[in-house]
Amino acid sequence: MSQLIHTIHFTSSQPNLHRMLGSMLKVYSDWAASPLQARWVVTTEPKSANVYVVDLDDEQYFDQMPTQRSSDSIVIALSKSTALLKKYPYHLSQPIRNAALLDILTRIEANDLKTTQPLPQVIQPSMTDLKTTQKPKQPSNNTPTHEIHYQLTHWPDLSQISSELLPNTSRVCALLATKPYHLNAIADFLNIPQAELQQVISSIKQHAFANTNTLELIHVALPQQPVAITEHPSANSYFLSKLWGKFKRAS
């Protein structure tokens, strides 16, 4: 079956918004772990698009909308006002939170699948499948029990980030928008040197939108190594064993 293609156009007079959304979409499209199944293509031609990200805070959007949209097009509304967003099933509030854009793109693809085939069901494990056979080992004083993970809470203003750091900054943001990760895991997963990763993290913090935080630090408990439980023989069992030995020798 051929891959479904969605062509997306950003309706806004702000060039920085185009650059930021374009970077986000490119990361999600190229990311190997992305849940997106369709091919998402950015276009500057409104008439060739079937998905529109419309900046409702832009005074020009009222004039642009009627000429750009067809009856079967999809609109993703973008605004700082929650009142303006209520009538749109797909909407983003500014500044954009963690994986909000990815969630909307995934919902659009899910609605596409409903017209062709049922969605696969995820079988949750039952409680009988979850068995614990070992007690956790008490950590020593020298063993770390927690580590710091980074979670993206709001996307930074990617349009303000240097062109040298923008590709890896976009990749790091896309990864941290899905779940928290430790710095070492980020570096290994995305193959980014630690020195550059530190610059990326600093850049994400520095270019936050006003009155927002881009990153949240989460203290995660490290898994404790299990220890085998050795059962020492009781006095009764020791006595019976000794008595049985004497009985065998006597016979």
Image (tube, helix red, strand yellow):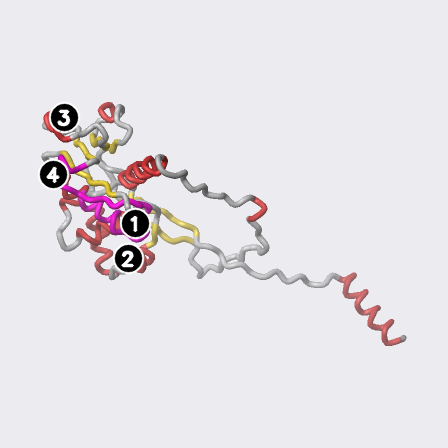
In the rendering, which numbered label is found on residue 175? 1
Residue highlighted by disc 2: 190
In the rendering, which numbered label is found on residue 69? none
Viewer-side label of 3, 2: 3
Viewer-side label of 2, 4: 4
Q: Reading the chain from its start, which is encountered first: label 3 or label 1?
A: 3
| Residue 37 magenta | yes
Disc 4 marks a residue whose amino acid type is Glu
Q: CA distance from mark 2 to mark 4?
A: 33 Å
In the rendering, which numbered label is found on residue 66? 3
Q: Is residue 190 left or right of residue 162?
A: right
Q: CA distance from mark 3 to mark 1?
A: 36 Å
The part of the chain drawn in magenta is 22-49
| Mark 3–mark 2 CB contact (< 8 Å) | no
Assess disc 2: are there few (<14), some (14-19) or many (≥20) residues with their C-alpha within 10 Å of its C-alpha: few
Q: CA distance from mark 3 to mark 4?
A: 15 Å
Q: Reading the chain from its start, which is encountered first: label 2 or label 4?
A: 4
Disc 1 marks a residue whose amino acid type is Leu
Q: Reading the chain from its start, which is encountered first: label 1 or label 4?
A: 4
Q: Secondary structure at mark 4?
A: loop
Residue highlighted by disc 4: 45
Q: CA distance from mark 3 to mark 2?
A: 42 Å
Work out whether residue 139 or residue 66 is closer to the camera in this orientation and state it: 66
Q: Secondary structure at mark 1?
A: helix
Residue projecting furthest to the front: 1
Disc 2 marks a residue whose amino acid type is Leu
| Mark 2–mark 1 CB contact (< 8 Å) | yes
Residue in the image at 12% along x and 40% along y = 44
Q: Reading the chain from its start, which is encountered first: label 2 or label 1?
A: 1
> Where is 151 relative to 75, above or below?
below
Work out whether residue 226 or residue 35 is closer to the camera in this orientation and state it: 35
